[in-house]
Image (tube, helix red, strand yellow):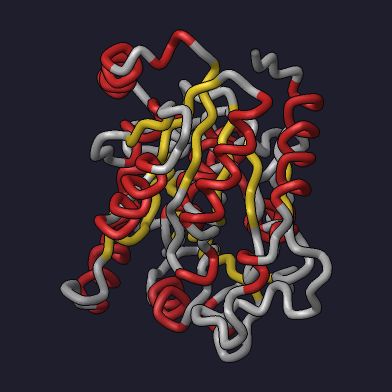
């Protein structure tokens, strides 16, 4: 890799909110290594908001497989004349796009039937390291120093004023705030509403705090309304409908966040909020809240953990049988390691 020839870079990563957030540590390191280069990012349309106003990027492009034609995308990328393309997704489509790009340097992982597309490649450590470090392995293979591992979500004054108004209108700033994220792409990843009710009521016995309930779709909103209606102290509040960066601003007001494996959990990490993840079918060692100040909990008694099944054939017991006492012990540990003062 002749770094003096790198003037234009494209990073490719498709996926959900969490997937893209776990990729953001790559960008400041690239910018440090190539301060004068144009750095662009290609992702799916629904994840673009994560990248808007990112100071390490020149532009964020989107692709929708349901609407956009691959050949149009390839034509556009070839016209851009990239010097370096880093394919962090590595599915057959992104491999072919990279291969057809005309870029001088094409990086990717050695996935079966796809490594033909790359002239710089490395064995991926998927299943061995956290996704953040998996993504950063691309830089290590390119001999680019890793000087930052922080997740990043750009939030500006408009988003913060939105969050301030929500906090002020509900008088939430009178106490510390715990965020509860009921979101999750699969039902098997979601801690159940009745379990959250019991957990919040148990936490209310020890801590004088307010809770904000985080939802994404209509089903999750209904779950949160149900949870709110059964909190004995009446100190749980639903967030308003909040696009990604507005949600980030609201989450930044929390003193900690507890939730399922989902995008908002990683948003909390990006906003610097101490985070406790509740995991079962997915592995927190690979997709958990990243960083030494965050924790995860699983039902360690089970031998079916990390099954990655969207539908559980045995009743989702990794969630339903997870001890509330152990979750509360993890909350206390999170408080201790972060020096959080809850009244």
Q: Nearer the viewer, residue 57 or 325?
A: 325
Q: Residue furthest left?
A: 67
Name the residue rendered at 31%, 12% in the picture. 168
Could you say which is closer to the camera, residue 252 or residue 99?
A: 252
Residue 241 placement, left or right of 230: left
Q: Residue at x 59, y 69 (%)?
A: 108
Q: Quadrant of the N terminus?
A: bottom right
Image quadrant where residue 339 sits? top right
The residue sitting at the front extreme is 232
The percent position of residue 35, horizontal first and vertical second, equals 53, 31
Question: Between 137 and 343, which is closer to the camera in this rendering?
Answer: 343
Residue 131 in sight:
yes
Residue 291's spot in the image, x, y percent?
Answer: 72, 39
Compared with 189, 249 (above or below) is: above
Q: Is residue 110 above or below residue 259?
A: below
Q: Position of residue 91 (x, y in %)?
A: 48, 78
The residue at the point 47 percent across, 28 percent down is 233
Spot occupied by residue 34 in the image (x, y as percentages of width and height): 56, 37
Choose top left, top right, bottom left or bottom right for residue 269: top right
Question: Which residue corresponds to the image point at 54% horizontal and 29% vertical from the top-left?
Answer: 178
């Amino acid at each position: 890799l002749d770094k003096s020839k790198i003037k234009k870079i494209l990073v490719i990563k498709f996926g959900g909110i969490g997937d893209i957030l776990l990729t953001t540590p790559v960008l400041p390191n690239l910018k440090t290594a190539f301060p004068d280069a144009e750095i662009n990012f290609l992702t799916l349309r629904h994840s673009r908001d994560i990248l808007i106003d990112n100071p390490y990027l020149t532009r964020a492009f989107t692709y929708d497989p349901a609407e956009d034609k691959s050949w149009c995308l390839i034509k556009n990328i070839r016209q851009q004349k990239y010097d370096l393309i880093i394919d962090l997704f590595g599915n057959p489509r992104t491999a072919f796009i990279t291969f057809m790009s005309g870029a001088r340097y094409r990086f990717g992982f050695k996935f079966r039937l796809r490594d033909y597309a790359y002239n710089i490649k490395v064995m991926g450590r998927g299943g061995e390291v956290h996704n953040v470090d998996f993504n950063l392995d691309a830089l290590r293979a390119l001999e680019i120093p890793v000087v930052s591992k922080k997740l990043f979500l750009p939030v500006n004054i408009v988003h913060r004023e939105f969050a301030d108004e929500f906090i002020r209108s509900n008088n939430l700033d009178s106490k510390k705030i715990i965020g509860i994220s009921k979101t999750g792409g699969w039902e098997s990843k979601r801690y159940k509403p009745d379990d959250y009710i019991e957990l919040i009521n148990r936490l209310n016995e020890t801590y004088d705090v307010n809770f904000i309930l985080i939802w994404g779709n209509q089903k999750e909103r209904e779950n949160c309304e149900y949870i709110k209606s059964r909190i004995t102290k009446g100190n749980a509040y639903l967030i308003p409908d909040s696009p990604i960066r507005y949600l980030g601003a609201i989450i930044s007001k929390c003193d900690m966040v507890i939730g399922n494996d989902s995008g908002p959990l990683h948003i909390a990490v990006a906003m610097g909020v101490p985070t406790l993840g509740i995991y079962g079918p997915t592995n927190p060692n690979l997709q958990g809240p990243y960083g030494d100040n965050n924790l995860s909990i699983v039902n360690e008694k089970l031998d079916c953990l990390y099954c990655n099944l969207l539908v559980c054939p045995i009743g989702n017991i990794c969630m339903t049988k997870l001890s509330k006492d152990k979750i509360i012990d993890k909350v206390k540990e999170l408080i201790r390691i972060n020096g959080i003062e809850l009244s």
